[in-house]
Structure formats: structure tokens, C-alpha cells
Image (cartoon, grey):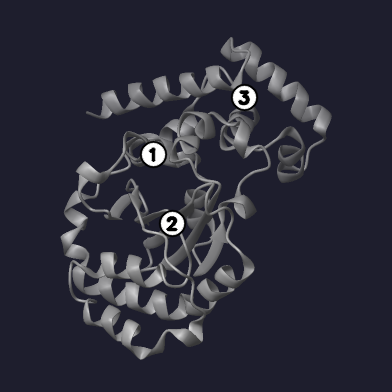
Amino acid sequence: MTLNPTTSVHNTEAYGLKALAGLIDHIHSASFPKMLEEFIGRICQFDSFLVLTYKTHFKPLVLHPKSPAEHSPTLRFYIDQAYIFDPIYHLVKESPAADVHRICDIAPDSFHSTEYYEKCYKYFDLVDEINLIIPLDNEVTCAIALGRKSQLGSINRQEHNALKQWLPVLASLVQQFWLTQQSLYIDNAKPEGAIQQALTSFGSGVLTRREQQITALILQGHSSKAISALLDISPGTVKVHRKNIHTRLNTSTQSEIFQQFLTHLKSLDDSIE
């Protein structure tokens, strides 16, 4: 993820038209994402800036930073496999409306105890993440992720409100950029492969359909209480299912289930190739 120098925060009235005009001037250029980073840096402070698109049946595509040389091993792991457990991915999949979301507001209640967090997310070293969600067409949604580390701390109300105020303008500009420049990126898009199939078929022949459903929710970071509410079953029933899942998979921890899932995914990918 790329670093952005700390910038002073201005309210929306302090911009003037010059900064906005400068951004518009780059709307038909490959330099637009970089100019967008600079523009948003005037609205909200951040340490990292990442622009991705999510398209049905495709893995996430990084628009900025575009060069793979600028992608950390953690980001590559995310793009290739781990995104399937990302709260933003599931938000986009279920409700891709334009909005500003903090990861802490949409993540499952046990997010920080998931293997996704331990094996991937925590290595981004963020204390807060704010995502601007922008639908681009019927199949593609853009997420602009602003990451903040410990020195900046969590986003404040003024910054958050400013992002929401600017979102309609930013969404329109990003949509126009994508309309004319998507050909620069779509050749790099990779099919999702077996990853969705892996999530639904994991444990097939060993787990019941309900146990498979609960296993997927566990891997995404939902606690037993949350699973109980989501599936409208009692907490005691969830507890029994969790015990049965470990027995049938011969596991004792979520980490072991996660590793089995990755092995299952690899076997499916290998069979497709």
C-alpha cells in the first residue's frame, strides 16, 4: 500500500475551484488516481491510499497503485485469496450503494479473532480504515480505502463528514474516469476461479449444509451470538454445531479450519487448471 505524506485538513469551503478543476483536468488520464489521492488528502489525513474494483466473478483489481512492484506481499495475498473474508468485499457484494464506511462499523463482531485478520489484515498495520464505495456499473464497484496508522489515530467527525459531503462529486468523477479509462486496467483482471465454489463446497460430504453455512460465517468473523441472530437459531444450537464441525473436520481451532479451507481452495484451483 502506498504512503501519503501527512497533509493538513481543510473543510469543504476552503478548497475553492482550483483544486477541483485540477482533478477534473486529469479525468481522461492515467494520472487521475494519483491526483485523486492528492485531492482526497486535502479532505482527510491518511497513511495509505488504495483504489480497487470488485467485479462479479473476478478477483479484486488494483487501480492504484497500479504497478505490482508497489504491492506488498500482504496485498498480493489479499487480492489472490484472502479478500473472500473481507468485510468490504461482502458489503460490496450485498449492498454496493455509494457511501462512506469505516471498517469497524461493518466488520463482524469477532473480526479481530479471525484467521483473515491474523494472517492478512493486521499486517496492513492500520488502526482505522475508511472506504469510499462507488458503483461504476451494474457489475463493477470501486472501493477507495484510506488507511490510518497509530500516529494519525482514528478518523475524526469533521473528516468523516467532509468525505460524505464530497462523495457525490468524487463518485461522479471516478465514474467518468472509469468510463473512458477502464481499458488501461481490465486486461489485468483475473477470473475468480474456484474461490466462491470453495467457500460453498468446503466440508462437502463431511459437514451438513447447516454446518457448512456456519463454518463460512465463523471464517468471516461472526461470533456464536451473531450467528444465532443471523440464522435465527438458539445460541445453544450454534454451540452444538460448532462442536460437530470440529469433530467432523478433526480440528480444534479456527486456524486449523482456515488452513483446511486454503488447502481445499488450492485443490479446486489445480483441478480447474
237 vs 21, left or right, is right
Dot 3: element: loop
* Residue density around tag 3, few if under 14, some if 14–19, many if 20 or more, within 10 Å: some
- Which is nearer the N-term, disc 3 or disc 1? 1
- Which residue is disc 1 drawn over? 78
In the depicted structure, whether residue 127 falls above or below residue 46: above
Residue flagged by tag 3: what amino acid is it?
Thr
Quarter-wise, where is residue 109 in the image? Answer: top right
Q: Residue at horizontal 60%, vertical 72%?
A: 158
Q: Disc 1 vs disc 2: Cβ atoms closer than 8 Å?
A: no
- Which residue is disc 3 drawn over? 208
Can you give x and y, in whole percent of width and height, for residue 214 in the image? 64, 32
* Residue density around tag 2, few if under 14, some if 14–19, many if 20 or more, within 10 Å: many
In the depicted structure, whether residue 159 falls above or below residue 126: below
| Residue extending furthest toward the bottom | 17
Dot 2: element: strand
Can you give x and y, in whole percent of width and height, for residue 60 in the image? 34, 49
106 vs 60, left or right, is right
In the depicted structure, whether residue 240 falls above or below residue 133: above
Quarter-wise, where is residue 251 in the image? Answer: top right
Q: Nearer the viewer, residue 178 or 69?
A: 69
- Which residue is disc 2 drawn over? 145
